[in-house]
Amino acid sequence: MQAKKRYLILLFAGACLLLLFYLGVIQLPAASRNRSRNGHRPEQPWPHFSDPLHPFLPWDQTDTEEYNLHVSPSQKRDINACVYKGKRCRMDSCFDFSLCRKNGFKVYVYPQQKGEKISESYQNILSTIEGSRFYTSDPGQACLFVLSLDTLDRDQLSPQYVHNLKTKVQNLPLWNDGRNHLIFNLYSGTWPDYTEDLGFDIGQAMLAKASISTENFRPNFDVSIPLFSKEHPRTGGERGYLKYNSIPPFRKYMLVFKGKRYLTGIGSDTRNALYHVNNAEDVVLLTTCKHGKDWQKHKDARCDKDNAEYDKYDYKEMLHNSTFCLVPRGRRLGSFRFLEALQAACVPVMLSNGWELPFSEIIDWNTAAVIGDERLLLQIPTTVRSIHQDKILSLRQQTQFLWEAYFSSVEKIVLTTLEIIQDRVLEHASRSSLMWNSHPGGLFALPQYSGYLGDFPFYYNTLGIKPYSKFSAVIHAVSPLVSQSQPILKLLAAVAKSQYCAQIIVLWNCDKPLPAKHRWPVTSVPVIVIEGENKVMSSRFLPYETIVTDAVFSLDEDTVLSTTEVDFAFTIWQSFPERIVGYPARSHFWDSNKERWGYTSKWTNDYSMVLTGAAIYHRYYHFLYTNYLPTSLKNMVDQLANCEDILMNFLVSAVTKLPPIKVTQKKQYKETMMGQSSRASRWADPDHFAQRQTCMNKFASWFGAMPLVHSQMRLDPILFKDQVSILRKKYRDIERL
């Protein structure tokens, strides 16, 4: 009994001491209390409220005794269990914006080290960055850094796994605890728990990661990317499947899935339950146990039946003939079926709780997918059946837009990632949600051009506005002015008489000095003569500030057009402001014998290009040509003094996914009618045509596919060739037989 009392007294005394210590009555010596584990003393562990706000320190820099005094045991467990030590990193705390202020958003890729293996997928990522307009070979100009060490597959059981990555990364001279670095990753963790641990400390680096969970995703810092296979094309990519389908949007199956059934472990719960909603009619959910070396050891009573049903169906046939495609989680949250469903115009039904969907920062997935809940699996069939066919069509159309805009190639995935980060860095010039979620998408709607949607040709219909009802003519001059009867002076006079002409800009790309002002005719509209930059072909497509209208009427100096033809072309362009509208048409074709693209100037029923020697387009394409296209293509055009018109057609068709528009004219536009001009001599050059063939294939290679689209549409004036009085016709010069 006495012993029990002594124990109680000691316990009470100990509790009192702890209470006094907690209240601050008893304090530890300052030397021991403020000393961290590494022996250094923090100068001021917690700032006063009057002090300026200090940048956030990542977890790996706050792991001290002093810091832990203020952290509860539950918080400590969370910290220790956290996959990323920089869990609380955000752009304003773990990114140095000052690196981007001087040279803009530039990306540096570390040089590849000898002996380091790199997977094909990671090489595609690095090649995309190095070929982009963001790339710089000078680390001193860089705003963002990307490792040459392959970080895509961090599964220790994978043959692509890079060993000793922790040491290799820490030894990089520019690493700086990962600050301003971007790490790409597709696979993390390994059997059996498949965590999101990359196996090395990423410090303050950003992650572009597939299958990332909302729990570990750091908003406005990380980027969630899709899981893509090693066969995913580097550039281009196949078009979406919707073009092969008809309306109404219902297909043979309502909901399908075909894939592995995990018998045990992570991801097994949902897939093991799919048979409950499979009716083998319009809801066909197939699973197989046959995967892994020892699947038979774990097989259950359903395996043989499931395997037999699984083999009866073709996966692609199901994919292309179903309205909805189930996308359940696998071992990891992401799945290859996500991209496969998008391309097939099969509306994804997401069944992966906690997955941060790809590019969630910019994409509104509610317009292209059905977000389900693994806990409510049995309600999925009823839910998808209740969706109206108008909504289904809208969802499927959006899958096609998103696939082609952001997911069809490694290049688009990487560039989208970089554009998202650039929007954060240049927040004042970031894209709106409408830009990201409507055609043509964020990769083609550059916010550096304008922050107002109405300045872009793609959004006129959405905003209910029309382009400015005037045009600026840009005449490309390469010949000296020696006679008052030269074609350029006749063209200038004809264009100036147009009721829609606001100004005429003569781009002087001639080696001879500028003619005196009195040599140019007096017109009712301003005539501005400017010298071309370096006298190269690409200078005709520079975004000159002197162009004050939406429409640019691009003209060669020897083009023969009447005022009526100019007026008619402009009125047509006002209805199609996102396209090239004009007169001289050309076409491309696939030469199966040479296995390359061919170029033809023959007059046929269809065409795919309208040359910029007499064409109207929106001035935004000058900005896009200058700032979007790589220097290599523009240098090629300038060296050849050829193909700039083809390159502009490639660009506009890549943006719009549509063909240009040819309008009719009074005179046939043939090079033989050009007279003895410099341009005529170019067409007489036998190498000129061969060069254009070469250009076609170089351009197609860079775009990753052939963007040009054939068309048989030609727009004529109303009453054209009709047997009515010529006085009743509006465009009489064109309509006169």
Image (cartoon, rainbow, N blue to C red):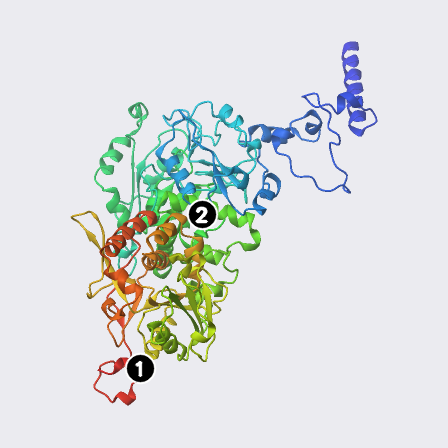
Give above or below for 494 relative to 58: below
Q: Which label belongs to residue 592?
A: none
Question: As drawn, which residue projects farthest toward the right?
Answer: 25
Vertical order, 482 against 439 (above or below): below
User: Which corner quadrant of the image does residue 663 belong to?
Assistant: bottom left
x and y percentages locating residue 314 in the rendered image: 23, 42
Name which residue lies at 33% across and 73% down. 487
| 322 shown above or below 389 | above
Q: Secondary structure at mark 2?
A: loop
Residue 465 location (% of width, % of height): 46, 71
The amino acid type found where label 2 is placed reads Arg
Q: Which residue is mark 2?
A: 133
Please state the horizontal and vertical placement of residue 156, each as a whole percent of the image. Answer: 41, 25
Give whichever of discs 1 and 2 has the lower sequence position: 2
Residue at 37 percent across and 42 percent down: it is 410
State the image coordinates of residue 462 (x, y, percent, origin top left). 44, 66
Q: Is residue 270 above or below residue 701?
A: above
128 vs 11, nearest the viewer: 128
Residue 344: tell me if it is visible.
Answer: no
696 vs 31, nearest the viewer = 696
**Amino acid found under the numbered disc labelled 1:** Tyr
Which residue is at the front of the view, 514 or 362?
Answer: 514
What is the distance, in whole Å, between disc 1 and disc 2 at their CAs?
45 Å
Left or right: where 589 falls relative to 162: left
Instruction: Name the residue that disc number 1 marks.
Output: 731
Residue 428 visible somewhere in the drawing = yes
Q: Residues within 10 Å of mark 1 (few under 14, many from 20)?
A: many
User: Dividing the picture into quarters, in which one does residue 724 lie?
Assistant: bottom left
Residue at the image point whose x is 39% and y is 64% from the top:
578
The residue carrying pointer 2 sits among few (fewer than 14), some (14 to 19) or many (20 or more) residues within 10 Å by Cα, namely some
